[in-house]
Amino acid sequence: MATQSADFQTLSRRYTADKGFRAFIQKGMSGYYLKRDQNKANFQDWQGARDLAAEIKYEAVNHLDKYLLEFEQKITARGAKVFWAPNAEAAREYILKVAKENGVRSIIKSKTMTSEEIHLNDALEKEGFGVFESDLGEYIVQLRKEAPFHLVFPAMHLTRRQISDLFQKELGSEPTDEPEKLTMIARDVMRRKYCEADMGISGTNFAVAETGMISITENEGNARLTTSLPRIHVALLGIEKVLPKLEDLSLFLPMLATAGAGQTMTCYNTMYSGPRQPGEPDGPEQMHIVLLDNRRTELLADAEQRDSLGCIRCGACLNVCPIFKNVGGYSYGTTYGGPIGSVITPHLRGLKDWKHLSAASSLCGACTEACPVKIDLHHHLLQNRRNGAKASPAVGEKVAFGGFSLMMGHPALYRLAVVFGRVFQPLQGLVNGTILDPLRAWTGSRKFPTLAPQSFHEQWKKQRKGKP
Ligand code: SF4
């Protein structure tokens, strides 16, 4: 069994068995559902907005070549440097090169899942650069030496008490469970880091081809400081982040806020179109845009699942997913958890090692329904399962489904199997879920269904007896 799959099973069992953890996550989510639904009602037509958003993303993803070149041309005309990174290594090397060539010592970062994807912090720290997360949630998980738990809420798995204990231990602060005080403790540390940093690294929510701008949306204002105080700004983005027109943001910004955090709009929405221009009093001296492919073009080449590149990383599919809410973000073992992570990770990191994630779904379709850009998530999970079974079929499954298919195609065999099933069912009951049970992978956490004393066919025959 692949390590990733075994790790997923171990961790997901552990989290699922922890009732306190599950109740905590459920409670955190209940406030989100309420606010999300209130804000959805502010849209004249939420379903129409989803259709439109899906259309815009379809256009952008299907013409990435055109829109990315337009974006590059516009933003370089205002002095930004664009680097096309084919993979994670190239992106890391470029950012390291910029840091070294400019004598950078300290780096501040705002929230970016793409940097998690390429393990940027590790690479920078290995080369001796101090890297500080400026997003509060990211800062908390960085202090704990953990990865983000959720695409949008990196520290949602922690209680205020745990955060207070962490701050006491790491920052020597007084104990408190007041959110404002906890925020002020982190802010105090962070303000000094902003002033010391030579380089600010940010993610990007959207890149607008028409105007050559990037758009960053946030609630704390930390991204604004990260991108404007240090003398160098590096923006990292996956190539799928591009939108054709500026006016598209009038739909995507409220949609991201509503689906992602149940807000009307996030508190800060900023557009950046290059470094400081002549005559401007502030802003970075250099701006670098790193356009990351990292196997996204392989996903683009897959006509069946290409639409998953339309993801705006709002996290809504995670918030409604019954699996995510039980197993949590860390069980997935990859940057992008939940339904969208299960869909794209096999493309980004290899089907063989990551196909198990697509099996971790009830296929209830809640994710597809929640997705603001209408990505057909639960069907993509099924397609991954099919692709996984085709690429490396499990012998046991092959035998089981081959036998099932044979039986269903031959009624006499089916009837014989039912008779055998009834005879051997009591034996199965004795070993159910134990090491002697050949079906224990399934029966370990479920009751084997009891076979009906009479099949439908037998009942039908009995009732029809004597009738014309
Ligand atoms: S797949 Fe849809 S719901 Fe999930 S994070 Fe992406 S945009 Fe949001």
Image (cartoon, helix red, strand yellow):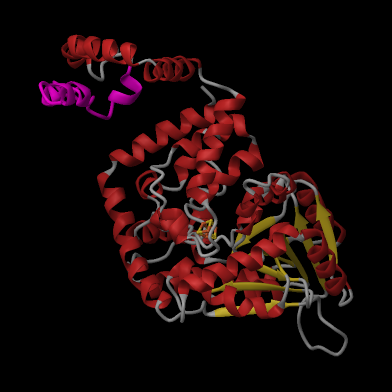
Q: In the shown orientation, is residue 100 left or right of residue 420?
A: right
Q: Where is residue 5 in the image (x, y as percent from the top left)?
A: 50, 30
Q: Is residue 300 magenta?
A: no
Which residue corresponds to the image point at 27% horizontal and 53% vertical from the top-left? 23
277 sits to left or right of 14? right
Q: Is residue 314 above or below residue 74?
A: above
Q: Quadrant of residue 443?
A: top left
- Split into 4 quadrants, where in the image is the C terminus? top left
Residue 444 pos. (x, y %): 28, 25
* Residue 230 vertical position relative to residue 441 in the rendered view, above or below: below
Question: In the rendered image of this protein, does residue 281 appear above or below residue 141?
Answer: below
Q: In which quarter of the image is residue 212?
A: bottom right
Q: How many marks?
A: 0
Q: In front here: 130 or 295?
A: 295
* Residue 187 visible in the current orientation: no
Query: Where residue 223 appears, x then y in whole percent?
Result: 62, 72
Residue in the picture at 43% in, 60% down: 167
Answer whether residue 352 is visible to the viewer in this image: yes
Is residue 89 placed above or below 287 in the rendered structure? Answer: above
**Is 422 in front, or is 229?**
422
Q: What stretch is highlighted in magenta?
A: 439-468
- Where residue 297 sits: x, y (%)? 74, 48
Q: Which residue lies furthest to the front in this view?
A: 468
- In this rendering, would 176 be left or right of 140? left
Residue depicted at 46% across the width and 44% down the height: 330
Foreground of the two, 1 or 299: 299
452 in the magenta segment: yes
Q: In which quarter of the image is residue 404?
A: top left
- For the point 13% across and 21% down, which residue is it? 453
